[in-house]
Each structure stands twice: as C-alpha cells, then as structure tokens.
Image (cartoon, rainbow, N blue to C red):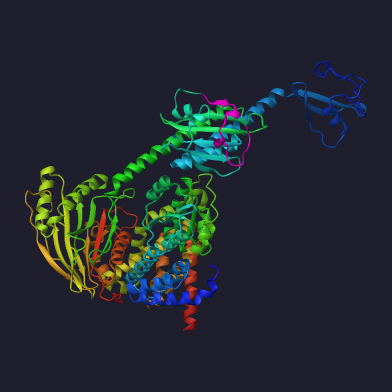
Amino acid sequence: MGSTIAVVPEVDEYAERLWAAVADGDETAAVGSVLDGYRAGIDPEALLLDVIGAVQRRVGIEWAGNRLTVAQEHAATSINDRAIAALAHVHRFPEPTRGRITVSCVDGEWHALPARLLAEVLRLRGFRIDYLGAQVPGPHLIAHLHRTGPDAVALSGSIATRLPTAHATITACQAAGIPVMAGGAAFGPDGRYARQFGAQAWAPDARAAADRLAEPLPRPHEAHQPIDDLPHLADQEYTMISRSNRQLVQAMYTGLEDRIPAMRDYTDLQHQHTAEDLAHIVDFLATAVYTGDSSLFTSFILWTAEILEARAVPATALPPSLELLGAELRDFPRATAMLREAGAALASLVAGREVRA
Amino acid sequence: MVDADGVVEAVNDLAADTLPDEQPGAPLSTSWLAAAHVTRPGPVEGPVEGRVGERTFEAQPAPGPDGTTMWWLVDVTALRDAQRALRIEQRRTEFLGQTAQALTASLNVERSMETAAQLATTHLADAAVVVAPQSRNRLPAVFCVHGGEPVHALLAVDPEDLPGLAEAMQGYPPVPSRWIDPAAAPAWLLPEGMTEVGSIMVIPLPGHGVPAGALVLLGRAGRTAFTDDEVVAGLFAARCGAAMSAAWMYAQQASITETLMRDLLPPTLRRVGGVEFAGRYHAAREFDRVGGDFYDVHVVGDPGADQVESLTVLGDVCGKGLTAAVLTGKIRSTLHALLPMAHDHQQMLSLLNGALYDRDNTMFVTLVLVSAVRHGGGVRLRVTCAGHPAPLVVRAGGEVEAVGIDGHLIGVLPEVESTTAEVLLAPGETCLLYTDGITEARGGPLGDTMFDDERLHQALAHCAGMPADALAEHVHMRAAQWVGAGHHDDMALVAITAPPDRAGRIGKG
C-alpha cells in the first residue's frame, strides 16, 4: 500500500465509473469497472474501500438528498454486493495467518455492506473470517461464538435506534469471553457509544479497524451487566417509553389531527407515512434517553427537518409533534428536557431559514 | 522500663519469663525493641512488633518517670496467625471465585483450556499445561507461563511419558494429584521460556462423569514447592474439569445439530438456466434458524442442455419450529424425488398429496410450483398453486399483478386439483413467491395492523427493474420493519427475475 498516493486519481476514476453503472442499475458494467480496476493493478483493498465503499457512501448521500428512493438504494447496494463478490472471486486471498474474527451486524440492521467490506479487507490482511452478515439474532451470534471461539467480534451498526440492542449484544459477547470491536455510524462519529457500552475497541472505518485488530484485543475480564454502563437507566424512563411506544404514537397522531385539520384529508398512505415519522421520533427519543445523550435526539430532529426540506415537505408537523410527545411524557424529567432542547434547536434552525429567505 | 540510654531499669515477672535475656542494668538486648527505643521519645508513639523465639509480640511504649520508657508487651502470635490464615483464605476464595466466573463464560473447549492454563499460572504455579483427552492420536494441550499468553499445541506424544498423566487422562484407576520427580519430565512438557523445572504436579480434571483431561503444574528450579495448597489446586481442577467437559458436550451437541440442520436450512439461490433467483427466510422464533416455510430451486433434466429448465418450490407446512422444519425436510426430499415429473405440476402435487395423506392426515402443506425457462429475451413460467397465496408479478412499468390460479392444499383431501397458469416475464420483470408470514405480519407504527396484500403491492410497485436479490431484500425489510420487535410467523420469499437484456435501468421514481 506504499503507493497509495500515486494511484489516487486512478482510484477516483474507477469510483466514478462504478457510480455511473450503479446509478444506471447496470450490474454488468458495475462488475466490469471493478474487475478492470483489479486488472489495472489497483490494490484490492483500495478497490473495496475507495471504489466500492466510496460509491456506497454516495448512495447514502443521494438517498438523503431525495435523488434515490429506498428501493433504488437497495438495488444499488445489491449491485455493489455483486461487485464485491466478483472481486472476491478473481482475487487469491492469502492463507489465514492471523486471528479468527467474527464479523456481524447488530440485529435489526439492514445495512450489511460496511460489514461485508470489513470482512473482505480483514481476509485480505490474512485474518480468518466468519462473516455472519445482517439480521443475525443475538442468540445465533452467541451460539456461533461458543462454537468457534474467535479472537474478537467486529460488530457493525449504522442505525442509532438499534443502539440498545447493540449494547445487549456487546455485553453478551463479553459474557461469552470474547472481546468486541464496534464500528459504524450508529456508534457516533467519535465512537462515544462504543466506549459507553464498554466495547474493547472502536474504529471509525474499515482500515482503522483492520489496523487495530493487528494487535489482539484484550479479553474481557469481569462479566458486567448493561446497567453498570448506564446507571441513569435506573429511572426506568427508557423502559417506559420503549414499552409504550405505540400508544405514544397513537396519542401524538390524534393530537396532530386536531391541530392540523388538513390531515383529515390524507390518503391511507399519507396517514401511514405520518405515523411512521412519529414512530421514528419516539424511537430516537427512547435511544437518546437510553444513552443519556440529548444530542442524539436533537441532531435527529434537525436532520429530519433537512430531509423534509430536501423532499420539499413543510416541516410544520415537527414542532407540534415534539410538544405533544412532551405532554405525554410530562412525568419523565430526562425525556422532557431532551424534547425541550430539540424544540429550541429546531426553532432557531427555522428562524435562521426565514432570515435567509 | 528502659532509660534514655537504652539501659534496662526494671523487668516485671511476666516480661522476665518472656524475655529472659533482658536483665536490669544491662542494655536492651532484643534487637527490634532496641532499634525502636533509639527513636524515643518521639512525637507519635505507635506500637512496634517483632519476634521473640517462636512468638510474635507487639510492644507499646509509654512515658515513664525521669525520661524512661515503659514498654508494654502483648503476645499477638495467635492474632497474627489468624490474620495470615484469613488473608490466605480470602485470596483462595477470590481466586476460586474468579476461576468460576472466568470458566463459566465460555462453552468453547479451546477457550476453557486457555482460561484454565492462564488462571493456574496466576495463583498456583510458574507454568501450567492443560491436556485434553486424546483426539485422533494427538493430545490437544495449552501451555501457559506466568504472565504470558496461553499457547495451543497438538502433541503427538505418548501420555505414558509423564508418570501419572495416562491415569489422570483415563480417570481410572482413581489417582490423587501427585508430585513427580522433575527429572522424569519429558522434554515436550516444558513450555517455551522455561528451561529447568524444580517441581511438577499432575492433577486429574474430573468432568461430568467422564475424564476431562489433566492439569500439570510446573515450578521453576530453585524455588521451593510453589504451592503448599493442594486443596485449592484440587478445587481448581474440579472447576476446570467441569467447565471443559461442559464445553466438550456443548461442542458435540452443536456439531450434531449443525449436521442435522444442514439439509433443513434454506439454500442459497443463484442464477439457473439464465434466470435470476433470490430467496429470503426469517424464522418465527428468534432462536430458530428453521421453521415451517421452505423453498428450493431445482434444475430439471440435463444441466448441460441448451435450454435449462428449473423448478422452484415454495411452501408452508402446518406448525412451527423444529417439528415443522422436519416435516419440510420430508416434503422437500419427496419433491426432489418427483423432479422427473416436473413437466406435469398437477401430477407432482397428486403424488405428494398421496404420500402425505396416507402417512398421517394431520400433516398438510400449501405450495407454489414454478417452472422457469428462457424464452426469447425473457422467461416463460408455468405457475401452479396448491392452497397458497398466488405469486405476484412485477412488470417493467411498476404494475403488480397476482397470477390468477387456485388449487387445493396438500395432505388433507384424498384427491387434489389445481390450475396452472403460464406467465411471460419480459427482461427485468420479476415473479415473487411469498408465504403468508409476510402479508399477515402484524405491527406498523400504530401497532397490531396487518402488513396485508395492499402494502405488499405498494412496496413492489417501487421495485420495477430491480435485481432479484435487491427486490427480495427490499420486501423482507419492509415486512420485518413493519413487525418491529413484535411476534411474527415464519416468512419466506423467492424472487424469480428475467435478467435485463443489456442491464436493466433502475426505474426512477
């Protein structure tokens, strides 16, 4: 990898070709561009991370900008997955000389590609890999760990609302005596939730993860309980919110209908989308209460406002939704404070926009 | 009573009995007391402690008349012995507690051996070797030196080389842990970083009714016996043995389960005869990997032929979990055997119905059969339903159509009937087979609402032109997210897609 700098323009060129093929839904061209890059001598790790990985990041950005639908995002991801498979097919991976690593996604996670890329990069670097992919229920992962006894678990998560599940998984792996490295957007840009949940390591990207795993991770010594990491859970706010999430959505929905008369003329699909948006707000609030980090909720609300703007949907329902949820949760001081903080941030964002307009 | 110059002025009777060497008029002769006396008088006066013969005394100074110091002696021998015993006991308890916690964490044989070897070196020995029962003429062993990492080895040695090892490994005749002559140790026993051994102990590891192996403790040369604590070593060995044997039994069970499960797991689908296939499976219960739904894609006839035909089967048997999965296994094998009749779906279904109806008429199954073959640029399908939801076809323009067919479920009636429809897929079009676990999934943002046919149609309307795998993933995700953390039935999906002629564009919007 000593010549990384010299090949950068070429890598960008292949990333551009792959993007064009992926955006066009052209699987043959997509696989062709990656294999051409391979034949032109581009390092397979760079192909995985700087070509396929770069295109996958762009897919996410395009989706957020409403230039791709969820279905198109799936199609693009599936084509990228084929490109990885094609590369894995032509490249001779080294015989494993290093430790055995289990690569898995947090249960409920649908973005398997980052984990798949990490698995391939680790194989390139000589690790022995068990790639379990997405949709791995906790009990299956633990049974796998007992059966194979790996040196570490690399746990990938991109959806913040799966953090409580991620925490349970990390604790369960450690209780089985296996250290955990966490990675992916869900754990925060600085890996704060990985640290909070007591993971043995965190990595911001696949390269850093592979570098970190070169040194064996320390074995977890004392079995700890999830509550040890998060003493604030003793107030039961998380439990109450997550247990009653559907009633909360129902109450917010009814309240919104009173405040926004236009909602009564919504189509079934619009009703469903509104309810789904409200369910998201409750899920993110529950996760913020779980981690004790109000910025998780505030940044979600601001991000939602931006997504709505990108989709040219007025965000008029957001402030009353927060108020309605606040009224339902008035007896929960931590949740209420988070709702107020997010409401204030949203108000100043809207004020800023009006000034610009 | 001692004066400022360290000369003894008076000794009471008890002190005279205890310290016969101290005579009035002579300098203090008990060295630790004399050393403490030199510092007198100091600002803070604490007791000092020292040995007299076999006993331990605490001496408390008190100011006497004319600058003298009175030293009050208290015999603390019993107290100190008790305290030392308590500390040792506390360390043992802590060690055994740690042992239990560390050993119960893993059900993996190699990991338990590592943990045992490493723990032994923290408390019992300079180095330890854990030997597991022989497998294929080799002895799996883990070596660990104090402060080091455990190292695995597969030893091609005779256990008879080390006195006591063979007996310990066999578990009979019953042998106590025993010290053996270090000179009798074979060279393979020495872990790296240890050249000379001063003491060796071989301890059997009792498992759950079967021998779990042996623990060998090694002490460096020149060191007195590293542990005077054979009782602790015995307790430790009992825990290690139980953990290793539990891990061994778990491994056996897991390996049996895996072998039996292999044929029950849904297959990985790929391209057959120029047609794309993708499947998704989601068992109802979290800890199950299989259930009552199943699918297979078979090649019919000669796989080398110009026109390769495939038969796709997707079905749903009554019941849940492993019992249902075993039934799916039987049905899948029966259908496999009936492949030569794949040209006649009705006959396949009749024969399967006969087999199930005769065997036990409480077992029934609903099925979809799809024969697929390339036809011009697209794919020609023959689709037959037996009491199952009709497959959906996603057209290039995003229209979603149900295939209009119907038929009896299999295994309940003595005779069954069904209709077969022909469907043509243009390049990029998909036929989706699914089980009712998808449409009957209950959940949604407001809770307890069915995912239902309408939402499945809506989801598919966005999937025009998608590759089979992406389409299957998308529908699976929609249904799974609809359910959320709630309960659901087994879910299975198979997408059959005519590959795009150049490469299909993703239908924008």
In the rendered structure, the answer to whether residue B154 lies left or right of residue B291 reads right
The percent position of residue B256, horizontal first and vertical second, equals: 33, 42
> Start and end of the magenta stretch?
B176-197
Q: Nearer the viewer, residue A154 or B454?
A: A154
In the rendered structure, the answer to whether residue B377 lies left or right of residue A78 reads left
Q: Residue at x 24, y 48 (%)?
A: B325
Q: Nearer the viewer, residue B29 or B259?
A: B259
Q: Residue furthest left?
A: B415
- Quarter-of-image position of residue A32: bottom left
Q: Is residue B180 magenta?
A: yes
Q: Is residue A272 magenta?
A: no
The percent position of residue A168, horizontal first and vertical second, equals: 44, 51
In the rendered structure, the answer to whether residue A287 lies left or right of residue A264 reads right
The percent position of residue A59, horizontal first and vertical second, equals: 40, 72
The percent position of residue A92, horizontal first and vertical second, equals: 42, 62
- B248 over A190 or under it: above or below: above
